Image: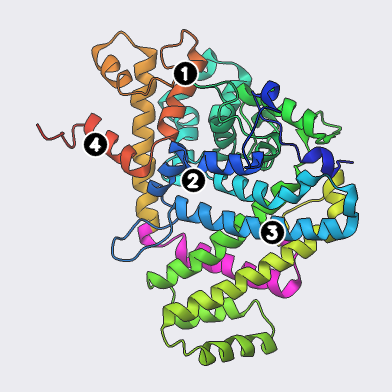
Amino acid sequence: MMNWNQLISNCRLGQEHRHLERHDDRTEFKRDYDRLIFSAPFRRLQNKTQVFPLPGSVFVHNRLTHSLEVASVGMSLGNDIFQKLYEKYGSELSPLVSEIGQIVATACLAHDMGNPPFGHSGEKAIQTFFTEGKGAYLKEKVSENFWSDITRFDGNANGFRLLVHSFKGRREGGFAMTYSTLASIVKYPFPSYHAKKNKFGFFTSEHEQYLNIAHRLGIEQLTASDGVERWARHPLVYLVEAADDICYEIMDLEDAYKLKILTADETRELMLGFFDEDIQQKIMERIETEHLSDENEKVQYMRACVIGKLENECVRKFMDHEEQILAGSFEGSLIEHIAPRQRDAYQRCTKVSKSRIYRSRPVLDVELSGYRIMATLMELMVEAIEHPDRYYSQQLIGRVSSQYDIDSPDLETRLMAVIDYISGMTDVYALDVYQKICGISLPII
């Protein structure tokens, strides 16, 4: 059974020896938050599409605004959970447990940082380059575990790598985040070669770092008759996941309304469906009392009500199942366990999103274009590291940042350097590089 006092640690990966040297008023968890906010990978999220392509005249969500909203909801979830835990355990809890809200908010900021350009389409392009494309021959040249990593490439594992890997010229421990923050982003705590789907928590190259974190925090390793290597989730992962589930589903509805994919009536019906008739009436009365005649304002108010309700439901379910969560036996997400009315309303939103939003023409167009861009970049860059003596290869390799070990004598290291380079691009930069190296556009001379 995991325990809260061990699970919440402010020790930093790679800087364990400096644990007691801090002298300012910021907590270590606030330092984590600030470190991400001011980082280049976090800033790059502003040019990574969340769902819709940026239409110009109407501002919809990108990965950056989404992550900030998830962090806001995550902070509320974490703070509310601490209050419930304090009511239950009182002074038995370490003072660090009061920082749960900050830890969850920071993990929420990081939860999408490993996503490649063009989201899931970009992930697929990297995977299929090796399974279906010109990279298939590399299977005979790399280890079995590495092949599993790259053919199942996942933004979750890539995000963990981004935070903990020591890139060239960078300090040990990568971002040198606290153990608890790092554990809180590992949604799938097992390696790729034990994953049932293309979802896993860390690459083979970061396996030892995860083992160290899990050991220090007392995260349970789960026994399995089939020999599968996996661990329990850190409890705060459930809160990060809930914040993400709440935001992307509800905010996508608002964006769809702004882009006229959904009508005002359709949006209102979906959002009011989370409440019984009495609460629905109170919400509409409040809208009238506040003299909200603008449809956008009405949608925003209903959206706030829905997020508040879902947040409360997730807190309640977390505490209902706290013992199972600490034992590593809780299954599914918190959203899947909320009250029937809210769960059914959420599932209706999901169904509409899949049929009307995620399959809309603008979204499909970006996915198709993004896939082709990513596949082409993978093909050209992998060919370059396989034949580095060629003139064109040298020109391509010259574009790569010095932090990536693309000149390594080890093939697996070079391949990961290519994936690090391409997955770290923004949508706009990937398009720009694609156009330039394909001769579609030329810089102004």
- Residue named by callout 2: 120
| Residue 116 left/right relative to 20 | left
Spatial CA span between label 4 and label 1: 30 Å
**Front-most of 390 and 258?**
258
Q: Main secondary structure of the magenta part?
A: helix
Q: Is residue 349 magenta?
A: yes
Q: Are marks 4 and 3 in contact (CB under 8 Å)?
A: no
Residue 439 visible at all: yes
Mark 2 vs mark 1, foreground winner is 1
- Residue named by callout 1: 169
Quadrant housing the C terminus: top left
Where residue 200 appears, x then y in whole percent? 64, 37
- The amino acid sitting under disc 2 is His
Question: Does residue 160 lie above or below 299 as drawn?
Answer: above
Spatial CA span between label 2 and label 4: 21 Å
Where residue 259 appears, x then y in whole percent? 37, 69
Mark 4 vs mark 1, foreground winner is 1
Q: Is residue 20 magenta?
A: no
Badge 4 marks a residue whose secondary structure is helix
Mark 3 vs mark 2, foreground winner is 3
Badge 1 marks a residue whose secondary structure is loop
**Front-most of 55 and 355?**
55
Spatial CA span between label 1 and label 3: 37 Å
Earlier in the chain: of badge 2 and badge 1, it is 2
Where residue 239 appears, x then y in whole percent? 69, 53
Give the residue at the far left of this rendering: 445
**Magenta segment:** 336-362
- Residue named by callout 3: 77
Earlier in the chain: of badge 1 and badge 3, it is 3
- Residue named by callout 4: 435
Earlier in the chain: of badge 3 and badge 2, it is 3
